[in-house]
Amino acid sequence: MDRFQDEARRTGTRLELRGADAVVGRWDRARLEQVVTNLVSNALKYGSATPVEVSVRSSGLLALLEVTDHGIGIAPENLERIFGEFERAVSVRKYGGFGLGLYIVRQLVEALGGAVDVESTPGKGATFRVVLPLAGPELQPTPPSATGLH
């Protein structure tokens, strides 16, 4: 979270981390760091200077990471498509980027044995939810549902 403080200040965004206890799992640190980086960067980019909340918790054998912004949101018809390679839900002229961030997130999360999904309302923001097995990918027989932990 410290890495994003300068960008948060520059965009006038309050960045909050929520989580009562440490969540410890067997994951590739670099892959997990890339997932968090992509999700928080997007939240700051599309959050329109509204608060961005990052929440981390565990339940049973699963860990849950949620990144929520209160910005422009995503139209319902784009919710699944945005995880595709080179896919975008907004104009490249206004927001920039290559349309790879969420594609990379999905690929990395699945490689870690998990799942990712998004809930959004246009004009009210988005919540990206990542569910990962605490034991790591090799001991997970079937991928968890990203909606399995609420």
Image: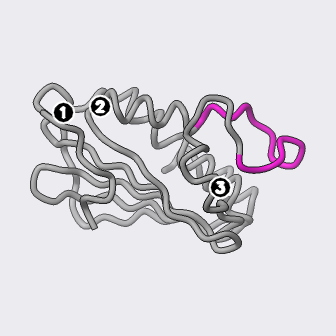
Instruction: Count numbered badges in the picture.
Output: 3
Which of marks 2 and 1 precedes in the sequence? 2
Which of marks 1 and 3 precedes in the sequence? 3
Q: Main secondary structure of the magenta part?
A: loop
Residue furthest out toward the front: 77
For label 1, the SS is loop
- Point out the image quarter for the C terminus: bottom left
Return the x and y of residue 122 as percentages of the image width and height: 68, 69
Q: Are marks 1 and 2 in contact (CB under 8 Å)?
A: yes
Q: Viewer-proximal residue, 143 or 65?
A: 143
> Looking at the image, which residue is at 49% across and 65% down?
53
Relative horizontal placement of residue 107, taking residue 51 as reference (left or right):
left
Q: Is residue 9 magenta?
A: no
Q: Which residue is mark 1?
A: 136
> Which kind of residue does numbered mark 3 sit on?
Leu
Q: Are marks 3 and 2 in contact (CB under 8 Å)?
A: no
Single out the mark in the foreground, 3 or 2. Answer: 2
Q: Which residues are magenta?
A: 89-101
Which of marks 2 and 3 precedes in the sequence? 3
Vertical position of residue 75 compared to residue 50: above or below? above
Residue 44, which numbered label?
A: 3
Residue 112, which numbered label?
A: 2
> Which kind of residue does numbered mark 1 sit on?
Gly
Relative horizontal placement of residue 73, taking residue 140 as reference (left or right):
right
Label 3, label 2: how far apart the Cα atoms are: 25 Å
Return the x and y of residue 16 as percentages of the image width and height: 49, 66
Q: Is residue 96 magenta?
A: yes
For label 2, the SS is loop
For label 3, the SS is helix
Vertical position of residue 49 compared to residue 111: above or below? below
> Which kind of residue does numbered mark 2 sit on?
Leu
Q: Are there few (<14), some (14-19), or many (20+) residues within 10 Å of tag 3?
A: many
